[in-house]
Image (spheres, helix red, strand yellow):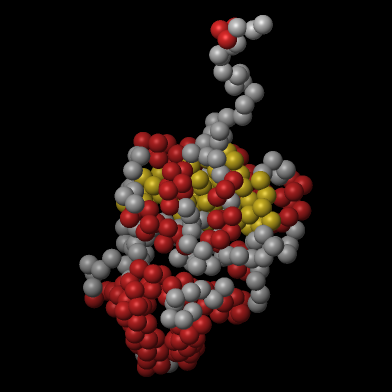
Amino acid sequence: MVLPQQISSSPPSQESAPKAPDVSVIVVNYNTGHLLARMFAALDAAKSDLVLEIIVVDNASTDNSIEILETQYPTITLIKSSANVGFGRANNQAISRVHGRYVLLLNTDAFVATDTLEKTIGFMESHPRCGVLGVKLVGEDGALQPSCRYFPTPYNVFLQRTGLSRFFPHTRLVDDMDWDHRSVRACDWVPGCYYLVRGEIINRLGLFDPRFFLYYEEVDHCRRVKQAGFDVVYYPDTEVVHIGGESAKTLNAISKVGRQISSLQIESELLYFRKYYGPSGLILGVILSSCADLLVALSSLLRRRDLRGASMALRHALTVGRILRATGLASHPTR
């Protein structure tokens, strides 16, 4: 007979239990198999003592991405989407798989520096009110890319498109590039190619609104993060090289891609304006957009005799009208 006090109350040995990941890295891949080796190599060189959990969501690639991922990176978690569901929804598929204290969204065409993970995680650790952190983004040539951004409004989008912002220097535009980007700065949103999120944010708010197929996902998410009382911060003490547009290049011919991407941007912008500014804000945005198209077309014709520029402005106006009808005045997405 075994007496109760003879039963060991010591917890089981934890020596064999794997350490919980510090960072869950989510990568959405679409036809960028040629970039995976470089992206993974940079990530591995930067991990230091951090424990990483890597989840790749493949958006129904038609290149050799799946073969590369399955044969060369067997330790990652691979989620195979049966269709291209867009950036936001693809990231959302990985949420149930994450276990890290932090979640990093990383593009396949974004290459971290050796100190990027350590420095950004360290900053988050010492700044508990920072909910989302972005870094300095540069191109292959070292040129600074927009990295510290502010919320779009019908008004500031109009000023930026028309160039009239120079007459309103105190208006905060979406991209403020007129400073050296060398200091930490609170902002409204940071690009999703390197998007470090505190784990509790994901638990409380989730990730992306599925109505945004492409573009504005991180704008919307950062807005919800700030509404929940957390900060969105730009951190300049490390750089991430970002090529940009690699997935889009595989979609079709360049001219068709331009039209498709423009349509996706317009749709997401209209959905965003309707979500946060209501029907009246949406209508104001459409009116200002039409005025911007008219001004751009007239300027192209009268000042530069640029028929192509005028034609593009007209196509933009027609696309806005088409998408308004297709989305029921931006009440639902088209896909």
Q: Whole-percent x and y of residue 174?
A: 35, 66
Give the position of the N terminus as an image quadrant.
Answer: top right
> Could you say which quadrant of the image residue 146 lies in?
bottom left
Can you name the residue that lies furthest to the front here?
1
In this rendered view, identify the residue nearer to me: 74 or 238.
Answer: 74
Q: Horizontally, is 238 left or right of 53 in the view?
A: left
- Give the residue drawn at x 51%, y 82%: 326
> Could you say which quadrant of the image residue 281 lies in?
bottom left
- Give the residue drawn at x 56%, y 44%: 98
Q: Horizontally, is 45 left or right of 302 in the view?
A: right
Q: Whole-percent x and y of residue 48?
A: 55, 33
Q: Whole-percent x and y of residue 6?
A: 59, 6
**Would you say residue 293 is visible in this rendering?**
yes
Q: Whole-percent x and y of residue 24?
A: 55, 43
| Tally of marks | 0
Give the position of the C terminus as an image quadrant.
Answer: bottom right
> Could you say which quadrant of the image residue 179 lies in?
bottom left
- Give the residue drawn at x 73%, y 62%: 63
Q: Horizontally, is 81 left or right of 311 in the view?
A: right
In this rendered view, identify the residue nearer to me: 183 or 155.
Answer: 155
- Give the residue drawn at x 60%, y 19%: 12
In this rendered view, identify the residue nearer to me: 50 or 199.
Answer: 199
In this rendered view, identify the residue nearer to me: 262 or 220.
Answer: 220
Q: On screen, 12 above or below 174? A: above
Q: On screen, 248 above or below 149? A: below
